[in-house]
Amino acid sequence: MAAKRTYSVRLDDDQLRELEARADHIGLSVGHMIRGAITDFLRQEQEKDYMDEVRADIITAINRLARQVEKDRAEQQAVMGVLDYMRGWLAFTLPAPADKAVARGLLAKRTQHFYEQLPAMFSNKSRAKVTDRMEQATATSPAAETSSDGQVFSHDEGEA
């Protein structure tokens, strides 16, 4: 057991009387109660420090997850815009010609058209128009969905 050292503490008369009365009531020495109070105080401070670290870790994790969700949402919207464009393109595009040179020229022309039209599929930099149409349709009718060309259909009733 380590040697105990003496540390002098000045107490108000009321504090000293209350401490001595409590020590007599419990049956412990005043010194033992003071050491217990100091131990409890130090333990509480350690718990506060630990809780502050846990709180900081939780906040960091939440912020990281929020950034990841935002990134995933932006990527999802980009995919939705591309898929919306591809749906329309595939529905109305004629097959490629048999001549490879003409087919390559047509491919280059279609690719250029795709890059020119793709931004038109977005409401803003990170939101696909098809998402806006879907939200508008579900806001008016919870069971209805909207196709990318704006037609509303319901799973229960077929196409509207």
Image: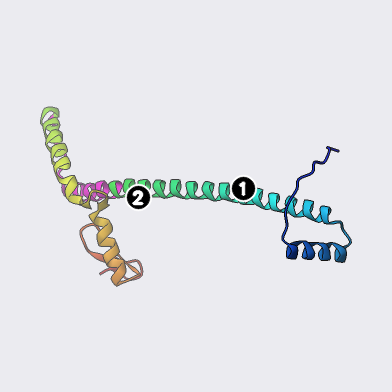
As measured in the structure, the alpha-carbon distance from the residue carrying label 2 to the one carrying label 1 is 34 Å
Q: Is residue 139 magenta?
A: no
Percent coordinates x, y for residue 51 in the rendering: 60, 51
- Tag 2: amino acid: Arg
| In the depicted structure, whether residue 14 falls above or below residue 36 | below
Percent coordinates x, y for residue 126 in the rendering: 27, 49
Percent coordinates x, y for residue 106 in the rendering: 12, 35
Quarter holding the N terminus is: top right
Which-is-in-front pick, marks 2 and 1? 1
- Tag 1: amino acid: Tyr
**N-term mark: 2 or 1:** 1
Residue 142 lies in quadrant = bottom left
Which residue is rendered at x = 86% and y = 66% of the image? 25
Magenta residues, as a range? Answer: 79-99
Question: Quick one: which residue is furthest to the top in this view?
Answer: 101
For the stretch drawn in magenta, the main secondary structure is helix
The residue indicated by pointer 1 is 50
Which residue is rendered at x = 87% and y = 58% of the image? 28
Q: Does residue 114 appear to the left or right of 1 in the view shown? A: left
The residue indicated by pointer 2 is 73
Of residues 65 and 112, the one nearer the viewer is 65
Q: Does residue 72 appear to the left or right of 14 in the view shown? A: left
Badge 1: residue crowd in 10 Å (few <14, some 14–19, many ≥20): few
Task: Report the disc number at residue 42.
Answer: none
Of residues 136 and 125, the one nearer the viewer is 125
| In the depicted structure, whether residue 55 falls above or below residue 110 | below
